[in-house]
Image: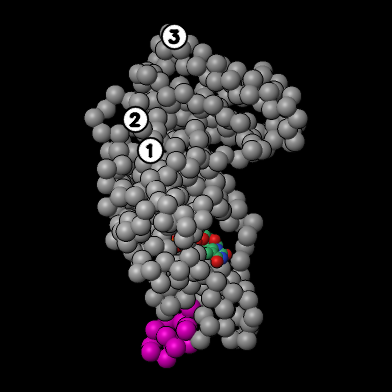
Amino acid sequence: MRIIGHLDMDAFFAAIEERDNPRLAGLPIVVGSDPKGGMGRGVVSTANYAARAYGIRSALPISTAWRLSDAAERKGLPPAAFLDVHMQKYGEVSRRIMAILRTHAAHVQEASVDEAYFDLSFLADEISSDPYENARELARIIKKEIKEAEGLTASIGIGPNKLIAKIASDAEKPNGLTVVCEEDAENFIAPMGIRVIPGIGPKTEQKLNGLGVRLVRDVKKFSSEELRTLLGKFGPELYEKARGRSESPLVEDAEAKSIGAHETFLNDMPPGDTRASRKALEDALKSLAGDVHRRFEKQVAAGAAFTKFKSITLTVRFDDFVTKNRSVTLSLPSDSLATIQFQALRLFMPFLDRRENPDRKSFRLLGVRVEKLV
Ligand code: TTP
Ligand code: MG
């Protein structure tokens, strides 16, 4: 059984600007090219939800956005703040959000700067009555960690495949969480407009509208072969998708930006109060460091664009799912196993005593990662 998540940040660029300019909190914000007092020729990158209430959205000419803001102001509403795009900043925020996601799921497909698929199928293997409920709980934790670390809200969809997960993440935006299990997938999309199905653009939409197909459920009037005649090889694919079915796999980055390994313990590991429990934790870390180093060397041998790493990150998840990341950047790039082991242990030390674990919680997961590959 597959369980796939899709995360999409809410009003991403605008939410970051709103966070970074507290005087704009709650006001309509438009991020995009210079409006030049209504004469600008560029477009809107995105607008926060307050500005969307004025009809302003991504890809609209910035001059139109200016006009809509003007019109709102004449009705006594606050005008929109027009802000420049700060792409580098958004990229950095994006990397940190993806790193949070990677502590929860081993397989992550970054689909865009603010959007990623992640595989939660491992939850189906755990002894539990309802893996989808566990997926919902994990999604809540991911949203909470992003909120705490970045002050931003995300919407998450959970489903049996990428198609349903993506549609689900959009279903309750902003700050949404929608879980659709395999049995409900077909009914979930049936009443939606056909444009929710990826691959249906304006042209295909028009063609299908001409045949009386407006909603996903209308597609089911046609056989797979009829759809093939109408739409070519996309036809049979649409036949499946209209029923909530899709096999499309996660496509992970070919070139790693980081290499990591983590282990969720079968039983939570006690906090290291005894010599034996301390040794067990240190052994687990050493073995993770070994895994990471082996994979690092394998990629170097296979001709990767890097030969060294510059930083090492430790991930610790407690039994209550609270997750901490601690990183160190080396003064000189390294390629040695000893460096990974030494630094991972050094980062872990404060977790063995009151500094990082004052409540003496047990450990659910440890992870080690090398980053800044050069
Ligand atoms: P989206 O996820 O499509 O939009 P969003 O995050 O702003 O809003 P929401 O998900 O809540 O509907 O795109 C992510 C970012 O990509 C967006 O913040 C800005 C950028 N972007 C553009 O620059 N131009 C565009 O046409 C679109 C759609 C997005
Ligand atoms: Mg988004």
Q: Magenta stretch: give its range.
A: 68-80
Q: Dot 1, crowdedness within 10 Å: few (<14), some or many (≥20)?
A: many
Q: Residue 3: which disc? A: 1
Q: Name the residue type under label 1.
A: Ile
Q: Name the residue type under label 3.
A: Arg
Q: Earlier in the sequence, mark 1 or mark 3?
A: 1
Q: Dot 3, crowdedness within 10 Å: few (<14), some or many (≥20)?
A: few
- Identified at 37% across, 19% down, the residue is 266
Residue 10 placed where, x, y %? 44, 59
Label 1 to label 3: alpha-carbon separation: 39 Å
Figure check: 324 above or below 21: above
The residue singled out by tag 3 in the image is 275
Q: Name the residue type under label 2.
A: Ala
SS at badge 2:
helix
- Which sits in the foreground, 149 or 120? 120
Quarter of the figure that contains the C terminus = top right
- Identified at 59% across, 74% down, the residue is 43
Figure check: 112 above or below 30: above
The outermost residue toward the left is 129
Asked whether residue 137 is in view, the answer is no
Q: Residue 124: which disc? A: 2
Front: mark 1 or 3: 1
Dots 2, 1 in contact, CB < 8 A: yes
Quarter of the figure that contains the N terminus = top left
Residue 301 placed where, x, y %? 74, 24
Asked whether residue 194 is in view, the answer is yes
Dots 1, 3 in contact, CB < 8 A: no
